[in-house]
Image (tube, rainbow, N blue to C red):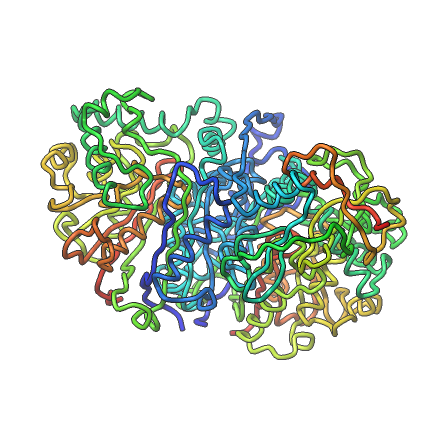
Amino acid sequence: MSEKLQDVEPMVYRSRISVPYHWWAGDTASAFFIALRDEQKIVGIRCSECKRVFLPPRKMCPDCYRENSEWVELPPTGTLRSFTVSRRKLAAQHKEPPVIYGLIQVDGADTALLHILDEVKPEEVRIGMKVEARFAEERQGTVWDIAYFRPAS
Amino acid sequence: MERAAIIGIGMTKIEANKVSDTFADMAWEAVNKALDDAGMTIKDIDNVVTTSNDFWDGRTISCMAVGDAGGVRGKNTSCVEGDGAFGAFYGLARALSGSYDTSLVLAHCKGSESVSSLITNAAFDPIYERKLGMDMITASAMQANLYMHETGVTSEQLAMVSVKNHGNARLNPNAQLPMEITVEDVLNSEMIADPLHKLDCSPVSDGCCAVIIANESKAEKFKKKPVWIKGVSFCADSYFLGDRNLTDARSLREAAQKAYAMAGITDPAAEIDVAELYDAFTYQELMWIEALGLCAAGKAGTSLEKGVFNISGKMPVNPSGGLLSGHPVIAAGLIRIAEVVKQLRGEAGDYQVDNARRGIAQGINGVCGQSHCVWILDKEK
Amino acid sequence: MGKKRVAIVGTGQTLHRSHRPDVNGQELIFEAVQRALEDADLTIRDIDAIVIGNMDHFEGINYVDCWSVDGSGGTMRPIIKLTTGGTTGSTLAIGGYHMVASGMFEKVLVIGWEKNSESDTTGAITTAFDAVWDRLVFAGAISGLAVEAQAYMAKYGATDKDGARVSVRDRKHACNNPHAQLRKEVTVDEVLASPMLSDPIHLLDVCPRTDGACAVIMASEDVAGKITSTPDWIWATANRHKYAYLGDVNWGALDSMAEASSELFGKVGIKEPRKEIDVIELYQPYSFAGIIWIEDMGIVDRGKAPEYIWSGATDMGGELPINPSGGVIACNPIGATGLIRCAEAALQIMGKADKRQVPDVKRAVSTGFGGCMWTDIILHGTEKPEF
């Protein structure tokens, strides 16, 4: 940098632009959330070609690359495939730490669902443990309609 | 593949906060260094590919910020959004397509200008996942946890990666975090998300890198001996973390296999002399080493303990200090390429690997290493 | 391996609409890709690499190449994202071209998409400009373009009526295009009576916001002829993304178009584009651009475009039809728009443009526009180029 600039104090501006978003969930995801909200049911979708059951459900099978059409009702139980304990308060997370994040493979699904665990101490969580969903009292058609997963009773 | 080479490299220092530099200032520095390195002027550059990310820059059309500094004014140009290794791939394609003989590729990021947790949270699906509030670190921690569970790799072994890389950084004047630390220091550092401690994680940094690629017709016409591009490939895995087998880096293996085949490499552990890999986290270095076949499957932890991946070892990995010592996202993969070029030219100074003839560089897009770009570079044509 | 000639062998578009609540972004992409694959009679397994793009801030999704794979077909495939603002679509087409021409991939799928309904378009666009110098005074894309129109009008005596005539043309053309969002004709009076947005630009002078996706399949000369009997050969590409600050722009003339088209036509030996080009799909975000930018392209001399357009020369049936698809004024899913221009030019060359087909098309031009008055331009032809 040239000598003229050596003594210039760098200025820092804070941005104030806010760009709000709302996303169309599409018919497939809407069906999933409506089932969660209105019936406390977890539904996956099966590809008629490879027979894999996807949770969360998708309109198309990523491997066979064709539209899925067979809806499958799944139980609220599953197996914990992996987890982590977030110890710091995250910028996009409203809950106070520690928050236990997990990948839960619901029974009957071939993919795992990303969610959180509660009613369990971090040091007691084990990869492979059996878990069950606890639905929220007030449900609005979002992932938080499942309040959390807890160790299966 | 028709022959092409890297004939110029330039980069800024990697720092926590380059408060006096705008994106354009960083680009200006890196581009001029690359031009000087190659013995070229901007007139010798036929086209420019910039690499940036709108989220990290807080700016839509983020390529606009570095256009002037990249010399695009009278030239054809484009922009890759993603890691610089992918940007370089496109720059290479443009140098081989018959339209241009030389491509200038640059990649920049100023991590200091944003809240990185929000930026990486935006990589999660807005409909099914984003509300959970995860970010790159928590997701990677889940992958690390599973990796340790399945392979038996220990926290101590992960810590050793950090000790090695921060130690290597003491020999690299461009690195942000040269540190002399012990395994205990790592294990005692704050637990961010189990099992990752603070010193298991790369920092978020500011930095910019520029690389000049030339095809065979021009590669030998400038100052430096060219470093030849022998193999290059990229590949993406599934998107949803729950769709993937997080401990099986199959997209990296696929990209590596294609790149090795292009380069005629059948035994990477024997034929590669140096590797600059994407160590955003300690466990990732070990996962990628195995997926790349740079050591036998399941042996990364024990090989690390034996010193195989040290600068003086049989398979030096991240002699520059890697991303653990300074991580400007987006520029990261391009810097890996530039560091391998330095090694193959014999210009790596205090962290030079002896007799480095062939090297591998890696860039990543996406969470938990979803998409990888692998480069095989060679001193000889 | 090495330099290969490249042709478009298939295209697909969604039915573009102001909003598509029935699909999320990945599903929108899937629709366009399925149509392109059907058009080329290929499956996703035939695709060697994918090039995808949009403008991030319109959907708020980071690392779109990674996120898109369920819809784009990118699982266990090379996928890369390009983005350059409004020029993204044409930048993608150029990207696909170089990927194939390099010899590294034989068949490349190019995808452009946007769900503009999901965000505040003006807010997002405002972030394009430099935070320190330009952002606080920038009032959205429309006012920038109004400045350009005013400068031209002051120099050549054109009026907003001339701009309106361009809108009338494109809105009429769009009636032939089932993909277009706005398929209702307008009159000059209706355009002038529509609300003034930024003098002299009225509401009906300007493009809408759209949800839509477009996919184009490019193939190397080694296989193009086996995939289709009417490949659309890419003869050349050129672009200029030359300004970064609004104050640097030469208002009243599109420098980037003048330079890029000059390079393009020079490369292939076209001396009189007006005579040698059969149809143009022009990325024309507002009506006046249809006047100013064809002068920059060298179709007509400076100041002569209004009379050329009023003469009907650029209407269907005229000497040089422009925007038979209805263009951007009828439909604007921003990340896709430039690619749609390319796809529409390809349809013209391939003879697949149905009701909007221009007869005897041998050479077509498609363009992209965006950023700080940037231009991309592509030349398409029925014949394989010699070089």
Between C193 and C381, the one lying in front of the other is C193
**Horizontal side of residue B359 vs A97, given as left or right:** left
**Horizontal side of residue C5 vs A113, given as left or right:** left
Give the percent coordinates (x, y) of residue B293. Answer: 68, 72
Between B185 and B27, the one lying in front of the other is B185
Q: Which residue is pictured at 72% across the width and 56% down the height?
A: A105
**Horizontal side of residue C71 vs B122, given as left or right:** left
The answer to whether residue B83 shows anywhere in this view is no
Q: Quadrant of residue C301?
A: top left
Q: Quadrant of residue C148?
A: top left
Q: How many marks?
A: 0
Q: Which residue is pictured at 86% across the width and 51% down the height?
A: A125
- Residue furthest to the left in view is C311
Quadrant of the snapshot with the N terminus of chain B: bottom left
**Horizontal side of residue B227 vs C334, given as left or right:** right
Between B89 and A44, the one lying in front of the other is A44
- Residue furthest to the front in view is A39
Give the percent coordinates (x, y) of residue B63. Answer: 47, 42
The answer to whether residue A71 shows anywhere in this view is yes
Q: Can you say whether C135 is above or below B167 in the image?
A: above
Between A23 and B358, the one lying in front of the other is A23
Q: Can you say whether B232 is above or below C154 in the image?
A: below
